[in-house]
Image (cartoon, grey):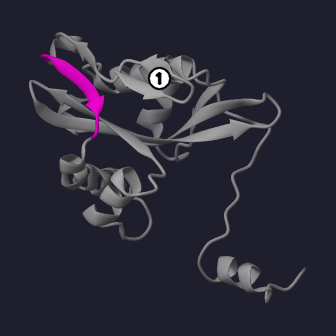
Amino acid sequence: MTVIGDGLRAEARTTVDEVGGAGRTVIRPAEPGDADTLHRFIVELAEAEDFPGEVRAEPADVARALFGPRPVAEAVLATVDDEPVGFALFYPTYSTVLGRPGIHLEDLYVRPEQRGGGVGRALLAHLAALAVARGCARLEWWVLRTNDPALRFYRRLRARSLDEIDVLRLDGERLRELADGSASAV
């Protein structure tokens, strides 16, 4: 069990026997010793999605983000018969309109040989249960428009696409320009 916020408790571990014939699947909180495995999965995910550019994060960056003095995210690891096969990395959000917290799923990955066996669904179900236990109003994530298998998977779970928002980003030089006041208005 994990104590969360105001004392709400959420199951820290989910065990599902024989998910889709995959064997004993366990979803557990990531531990500091999992940083290398999580990093390897992040690289595999980026390669599988043809993510533009290289993964610059190193295992130490992952460890610092999850287990450092000021953690900014959490992760759960999926294992089948004690072998790591996938993960979900997430962080808290807040809706001013709803006045309630939420969870943003940054990455969900299941190794190709384990796909179709229910591991991805078990990861999402674990996060949904965690969101409910924490009093969250929503669980949300972004998916590349080109990732058709993921889009089909999420739609089977009845997740909906948002038409009412666009995802915008400032990064690199543009971020630095705005921060130092040198960004010109158009």
Residue at 46% across, 56% down: 70
- The answer to whether residue 49 is visible is no
Q: In the current view of this chain or complex, which residue is farthest to the front? A: 7
Q: Position of residue 4 (x, y in %)?
A: 48, 28
Task: Tell me the quarter of the image containing the N terminus.
Answer: top left
Position of 153 compared to 17: left or right?
right
Q: In the current view of this chain or complex, which residue is farthest to the bottom? A: 182
Instruction: Give the residue number, with chain letter if any, for mark 1.
Output: 130
Instruction: Give the SS element for disc 1.
Output: helix
Q: Is residue 63 above or below residue 80?
A: below
Q: Which residue type carries mark 1?
A: Leu
Boundaries of the magenta span: 23-30
Sort mark 1 into few (<14), some (14-19) or many (20+) by Cα contacts within 10 Å: some
Position of 7 compared to 110: left or right?
right
- The answer to whether residue 93 is visible is yes
Q: In the current view of this chain or complex, which residue is farthest to the top? A: 17
Q: Nearer the viewer, residue 145 or 58?
A: 58
Residue at 78% across, 30% down: 99
Q: Position of residue 167 (x, y in %)?
A: 69, 52
Q: Is residue 17 above or below residue 113?
A: above
Q: Is residue 108 above or below residue 123?
A: below
- What secondary structure predominates along the stretch shown in magenta? strand
